[in-house]
Structures are given as C-alpha cells and as structure tokens.
Image (cartoon, rainbow, N blue to C red):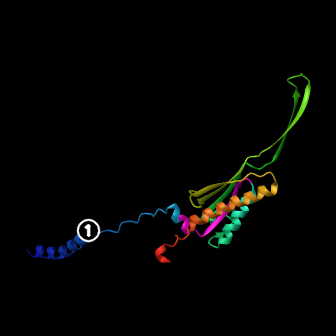
Amino acid sequence: MFHTKVFFCLTAPILTLALVAAQTPQPTPEKPRVETPAARLANAKSVLVMRTRGNSIPFDVIRDTVDGWGRFTLVETPDQADLLLQVSTSGGDSDLRVTSSSGPSLSSGRYDSSNHSSRDISATDVKLTVLDAKNRRVLWESNETAKYAMKEKARENNLVEAAQRLASKLHERLEPPPPPASKDQK
C-alpha cells in the first residue's frame, strides 16, 4: 500500500505534465509566402536593363528613363538585380540587303551573274519584358510599334517615342496615377 501511494505521488505530476503538453497546440510551420507579380514589382529595389536583340536606341531610352526615376538602383549583373528589364526590337531595320548569284541562266543556258538589292520597310516592334531576377518569371510585358519612316533621323525619333511609351506604361504599372478628384472633394 505504501508503495502504491509513493508510485502515485511520483507518477501523477509526470502524467499531468504529459497531458498538458499534449493539449497545447504545436506551432505550425509557416508556409512560404508566394509573392504576386504586382508585389514583386512593388518591392523591387534594383534592376538590370538588358538589350536582348535589335536596335540600341530603345534600350538606351528605357535605361536612361528608369535611371532617372530614382526608384531603382541600376546594377551590372543579374545576381545583383531584383528585376531584369529586357528590351528588344524586331523588324524595320531598313537595312539594305544585297545578294548576288552566279550560274547558268535558265533562259539562255550561258553562265550569268546577277545582283539584287532589297530594303526592309516594315515597322519596328519594340518589346519590354520585366522578369523576376531570381526565378526568371515574367512579371510584366508590353509591346509598342514604332511608326515607319523613310529617313534615318525620323526612324530614330520614332524608336525613341515608342521606347518612351513603353517606359511610361511601366511607370504607370509600378506607380499608378492617383484617381481623379471627385466633385465632392473640390
């Protein structure tokens, strides 16, 4: 009987502690938060502006515009960046292409050589893609078409205007303009 009382006195507190510990909720491990593209854009501090292909004019305009905002730090490598801004152009280079061929003529059968020149007169598409630098996920993308022009200077001005429109679109996406004041607030 004495042993039973001692056993009960020793085991009762241990059992009570075990029951209390079992009933207290265990902290659940936190799930990693998934950032939305809008949140990732809003939280970014550093960018790398890259020219992926085409004319360098839109690249220069967008890089200088982003640098002028003061919102981002421009960096030199993807490892340092939060965002990658890829600028590309396609078409409308207006390059003169000259091709020559030689061989037997189909009409006369004699050896003949010919030259042909052509010019690409299509409009230039300028594309700006914003990627998450860590996982390369596309966060935002937009295209603008530069007007076609015959003269080189006008073509360059049209590329500048298209790049400025893209930079404005990105700026509005990052920092939407305030809503217009209602009549009650005036």
Q: Quadrant of the N terminus?
A: bottom left
Q: Is residue 53 covered in magenta?
A: yes
Measured as percent of width and height from the top left, residue 157 is found at 76, 59
Say left or right for 112 vs 50. right
Q: Is residue 93 left or right of residue 125?
A: right
Question: From this viewpoint, which residue is outermost toward the left?
Answer: 1
**What residue sits 26% from the left and 68% below the top?**
22
The range drawn in magenta is 40-54
Q: Classify mark 1: helix, strand or loop.
A: helix
Locate residue 112: give its quadrant.
top right
Residue highlighted by disc 1: 22
Around disc 1, counting alpha carbons within 10 Å, would you say few (fewer than 14), some (14 to 19), or many (20 or more)? few
Where does the image place residue 162, in percent across and percent down from the top left? 69, 58
Q: Residue placed at 15% from the left, 73% from the top? A: 7
Magenta region includes residue 2: no
Judge by depth and name the residue closer to the eye, 7 or 114. 114
Residue at 74%, 57% in the rendered image = 158
Q: Quadrant of residue 166?
A: bottom right
Location of residue 174 with respect to 109 vertically, above or below = below
Foreground pick, 117 / 80? 117
For residue 86, side relative to residue 104 (left or right): left
Image position, residue 119 (x, y; %): 80, 44
